[in-house]
Amino acid sequence: MSGAETPVTTVGRGAAVASWIWTPDRRKVVFAWVAVVVLFLIGGFIKSGFASGTGITTILLVASFTGFVATGQMFVILVGGIDLSIPWVLNAAGLLLVTTSLGQDDHALVAVLLTLGLGLVIGALNGIGVGYFGISAVVMTLGMNGVMQGLTLGLTGGMTCDRCTASAPDVVRRAVVGNALGVPGDLFIWLGVTALVTFILSATVFARRTYALGSNERASFLAGINVKRLTVVLYMLSGLFAALAGIALTAFGGQPTLGLGDPYLLQSVAAVVIGGVSILGGRGLFLGVIAGSIILVALVTLLQALNIADSGRDILYGVVILAILLLYGREQNAR
Amino acid sequence: MSLTRQTAWRAPSRHFVAQNSTTLLALVILVFSVVAYLVLYYQSLGHFPDQYDLTTIIDTALPLAWVGLGQTIVVVTRGLDLSVGGVMSVAVALAASRMHDVGTMILWCVIVLLVGAFAGFVNGVLVAYAKLAPILVTLATLSIFEGIALVVLPQPGGQIPVGLTNVLTNPGHPYALIYLFLILGIWSVFRRTSLGTAIFATGNDETAATANGINVARATLAAYVLSGLFAAVAGLFVAAQTTAGDPGAGNPFVLTSIAAVFLGGATIFGGRAHALGTVCGALVLTLIVSVLFYANVNQLYQAMYEGLLLILAVLLGILVGKLARTSR
């Protein structure tokens, strides 16, 4: 920019271009990433090592689990839906991984495919309930969460079965926590997911249809979009990513635990919205969701570094989420 | 003469059925649950449940019914209150740590109700005036209230005065039924107040409500205040039942309160719900535990049956609603 010599007309065009680039949706993504940087700066000041290489890597590794579920959650929130079945789809996925592989590498591929398939099937059932039968997303996925919880606990005898004590296959563990170039493999998986989802959501017809459906269901239907089928696909994606998170978490911890997925219901919703996606659907960018996942985990880590008791952590966590929402999460007619 | 009388009687009745089809469906589901319970109970024990059994079931359902009453009012405004679990936990924590004798018991009952109403007020301001989405607001405040409950009562313990248990949940006396009718009474009064009308109008159509001079923001705020208040009442009932304090006592009610409301026939689109349906939903969700027990079903599967029941009930409601509309 050459300041003084710039003709008036170009300034006008520059402003137009600026407002075209600087859309509200993109502004939210920038804010979210600024919040990430600020959190790491504060953390670095408070505790040495927080913003170091290993500190950041650890936070990113934990954030990737939230990132996976939030990715799936984003797909359904983009069309104004919500997936409350994530906790027990995730938990069931972790169990299915170890019970089908029994920790053996030669069964790992089949086990991983079966587990991801489970996520897809449950997601499809959710999508059929919501899309074809018109059951509200809250009810359908809440009910499905109960079904998965009951099935998981019942079939495994409360996770006391012999097979339940197996560990994740070594090859899967190494893929998730094993180092490559000094970085856990899981972060490469997350990077791959990020690249893929960013591409899908910015350059495909599927994305156009999804945003259209989220903006106006009736108009989308009239424009010839197969609304019901698209709904099923989106819920399948949510199930798929919940299962992926279940695999990653099980590999991370070695074994699945009871209630593995419980924290991820509310975290996934919070990450999506803090990332600038409208809870009403139709608006929001995936890069913000990644920032949202990192914010949540960095915040918890920061509060832990401050040696704040559980109670104070809960309170501050809620207050900070509210503060972030008040800064830029306000919706016109959000109710 | 008799013909006109007959049509005058029949027309509103059919309208009534169409309008309240989902609430009636909830009643039918409750009747089926009660029958299943009685049959299975008789099969396994050889006699019918006595007053003690029945009172215990209603006692167990009461906290869910109270918190469901508040949740129903919020759902009418197209909202959702996830923070009720946190409010209940705070109520239990306060009751367990602050009540010692009759005097402190009465004092802290009042304070707990005020705390609950204030918690709802915070939610309401953020939803109605700051225009934040209800699910996000109450998600954040749930975390805050859970934290506060932990500050009040760091670990499970404390003591609930016997007086509170005797008044609120005494399986020896059929008080429980009185409280159920109290909930329905509160609802029918609420429906007839201008506030109730304003909240329903807001849930049906905000623009139309505003055009008719209703302060939509204030009605929404009031809905959340009521939800917080009734969640606090539910917390007192939980405290009375468990007789000891647990700072996480309210957690299970976040999702079950929502389940009870939708099992009771409320619609997510707002403007249509009935406390009778929610009370039925709470009773069904409580009965199902006993039904599964006497049917010798492995209790680990319990959540599955609850989930299936919720989905099927709502699906049935949709079908019945469609039938009622097409047959008109």
Image: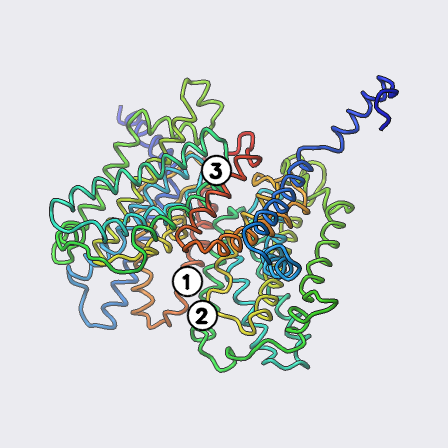
**The residue marked by circle 1 belongs to what chain?**
B
Pinpoint residue B211: horizontal percent, then vertical percent.
Answer: 46, 18
> Pointer 3 and pointer 1: residues touching (CB < 8 Å)?
no
Residue B15, quarter of picture: top left
Residue drawn at point x = 66 percent, y = 50 percent: A229
Q: Is residue B312 above or below residue A8?
A: below
**A274 or B273: nearer the viewer:** A274
Pinpoint residue B59: horizontal percent, then vertical percent.
Answer: 22, 54
Q: Secondary structure at mark 1?
A: helix
Q: Please state if B43 lies on the left or on the right of B223 as rendered.
A: left
Q: Which numbered disc flags the more N-terminal residue, 3 or 1?
A: 3
Q: Is residue B312 above or below residue A209?
A: below
Label number found at residue A207: none
Quadrant holding the N terminus of chain A: top right
> Pointer 1 and pointer 2: residues touching (CB < 8 Å)?
yes
Return the residue at label 3: B269
Label 3 to label 1: alpha-carbon separation: 26 Å
Return the residue at label 2: A153
Question: Does residue B308 show up?
Answer: yes
Return the residue at label 1: B303
Residue drawn at point x = 12 percent, y = 44 percent: B103
Residue drawn at point x = 21 percent, y = 54 percent: B240
Q: Label 2 is placed on what type of residue?
A: Leu
Q: Label 1 is placed on what type of residue?
A: Ala
Label 3 to label 2: alpha-carbon separation: 33 Å
